[in-house]
Amino acid sequence: MEPPPPSQRILIFGATGKIGTYITSAIANASPPFARVAIYTSANTIAAKAAHVEALKARGVDVVVGELDDDDKIKETYQDFDTIISCLGRAILSHQTRLIRLAAISSPPIRRFFPSEYGTDVLHPVTPDPRAEPPHRYKLEARALLERLASGEAGAEAEGDASLSYTYIVTGPYAEFYVAPTGQRGVEGGAMAWDRAGGFDVVNRRATLGKGQGTDPIALTTMPDTAHFVVCALRHPAQTHNRALRCHSFTTTPSAILSAFEAQTSGRGTSEQETSGRGTWAVKYLHLDELCERERAAYARGDAEKGLFSVRRIWTMGGSVYKGWKEGRGWDDSGEWVVRQGWTAGTLEGVVRGEIERQMREESEGEGMV
C-alpha cells in the first residue's frame, strides 16, 4: 500500500474536548493552511460551547452539526474530506470503530485516519497484557480494525477500502494533567479526592508523589506539542503512513516537579510555608501497591474517573519511558526518527508556571480544591 498524498481536507471529531481543542487550533493555524478544516459536533455542544465554536468559525473552521450515532449524516459529511482526525474522549471512544468503518467505505475515499490514541501507549512493554487494561479496550479495537483494513487480509474487503491509511500519535501522560491535582472541590473523601492518584495542590502547598521517593522517571508531553506533532504527521504522509509515532516533550521525576513548584511558589505562602526562600510543601508518597488497591476500589464502586487510576498505575510502573528518547522528538516502532521538523518543545518550568496560574485563578473564582 502506497502512502497517501499530503492531507488537505480535514474533518475533526471531538474538536472541543481537552486535547481536541489544541489539535484543532494547531491545524486551523497551520501555515501554509490546509484547503479545508471542519469539525463534526453535536447541537448540544454548540449550545454549551457557543463562544468556542464561534471563535473557530472566525478562524475559517467549518462546523458540521450532527450526532455520533447518525451514520447517514457522517457518510454524507465524509464525501468532502480526505483525512479524519478523532479526538474523542474516553467516555465516547466506543464510537470510534464505527467512524473507521464508515471512512473505509466512503466514496470518494477517505485516505487517512488518525484515531484517538493521544496518551498512554497501549502496547508499552511494561504492560504484560494490554487487553486486560480497561482504558485500552477501545483503542486496541480501533488499532485492530485499521491494521486489518490496511493489510487486506481475508475478510477485510467486506469492511472497506484497503487504501485507508492510519497514523497513531502516542504521547504518554499530558504534562498539564500530570501536574494537576486529581480531584475537584466537593469530593473530599471520595475516589477523586485531590491526592487519591497523585498530584500537586498549589493553594494548600501539598503534593502526593509516586512510589519510592519520587525519583522514578516520567516522560511527559505538553498538549501544544501533541498538536504540533499531529500537524507534522499530516504534512509528512510518507514518513508517518501506517505507523505508531511516539513523541514527548521532556523527561523528569515527581521530585523534580515538586522542586519546580516549590521554587515558583516562593513568597506566595504564609510565613509558616516559607523556608530558606522556597515555598515548603507537605509531601506524601503513594506506593504502587496502595495505588493498585485504590484502583480496584474505584472499579468496584464504578467511579466515573476510575480509568485515571489505571493510567497512573501504568505510568508509575514506567509505562511512559523508552530508552534512547531525546527531548521534543518523535519515534516510530523501530526507533527511527520520523518527523525531523524541530520545534520549541514545552518545558517543566513552563508547565508548572501555567498550573500555578490556573489553580490560583480557580481558587479566586471559588472553583479550587477542597
Image: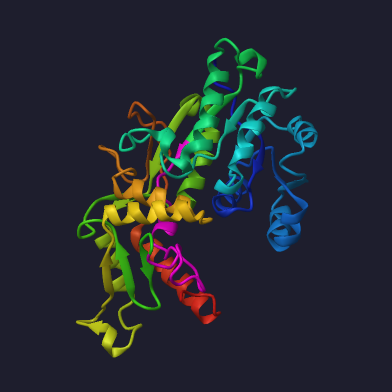
Residue drawn at point x = 75 percent, y = 47 percent: 63
**Residue segment shown in magenta:** 169-195
Depth order, front residue of 27/319: 319
Q: Relative to 12, is 195 above or below? A: below
x, y (%) of residue 188? 45, 72
In the rendered image, residue 44, in percent from the top left (x then y), is placed at 75, 55
Q: Is residue 186 magenta?
A: yes
Question: Residue 317: x, y in percent?
Answer: 29, 46
Above or below for 106 versus 188: above
Query: Quick one: quadrant of the N terminus?
Result: top right
Quarter location, residue 9 = top right
Q: Main secondary structure of the magenta part?
A: loop
Q: Residue at x 40, y 68 (%)?
A: 353
Q: Is residue 135 left or right of residue 18?
A: left
Q: Tell me the residue at 58%/22% (across/down).
A: 4
1 relative to 341, above or below: above
